[in-house]
Image (cartoon, helix red, strand yellow):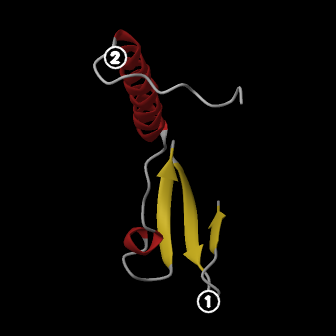
Amino acid sequence: MSYLRPISEPGSPAAAAQDAQARAQSSGADRARREAELKSPPMHDARALTDGGSEARIVLDGAVYTLRVTRLKKLILTK
């Protein structure tokens, strides 16, 4: 079957090449995961923003917004 990869003898050049390829693939996946984590926006707990209450004021460029937590645990942001 063509989709099966041949198994190389341990210690052979082919086995070393397969090991290097596997390490490169896993390090590439690890690198991509780390980059995605670095690019993700900061996360804040809404309960911490409201100080345990149901409302918080947020200022952006001088404009004041109100963040409210509803009884159904939904967030509403209004200007």
Q: 39 or 79: which is nearer to us? A: 39
Residue 26 location in percent, x, y? 42, 31
**Circle 1: is it few (<14), some (14-19), or many (20+) Cα within 10 Å?**
few
Please identify the quarter of the rendering in which residue 22 is found. top left
Q: 67 or 61: which is nearer to us? A: 67
Residue 33 location in percent, x, y? 45, 37
- Foreground label between 1 and 2: 2
The residue that appears at 56% across and 68% down in the rendered structure is: 67
The residue that appears at 68% across and 30% down in the rendered structure is: 3
Kindly give the residue lying farthest to the left in the view shown. Answer: 11
Dot 2 amino acid type: Ala
Dot 1 amino acid type: Arg
Name the disc covering residue 16, or none. Answer: 2
**Circle 2: is it few (<14), some (14-19), or many (20+) Cα within 10 Å?**
some
Q: Work out whether mark 1 precedes mark 2 in sequence or the reverse, and give the earlier one.
A: 2
Disc 1 vs disc 2: Cβ atoms closer than 8 Å? no
In the structure shown, which secondary structural element does the residue marked by tag 1 occupy? Answer: loop
Q: On screen, 33 above or below 53?
A: above
Is residue 6 rendered to the left or right of residue 9?
right
Kindly give the residue lying farthest to the bottom in the view shown. Answer: 71
Q: Quadrant of the N terminus?
A: top right
Q: Which residue is mark 1?
A: 71
Q: On screen, 11 above or below 27?
A: above
The residue that appears at 47% across and 27% down in the rendered structure is: 7
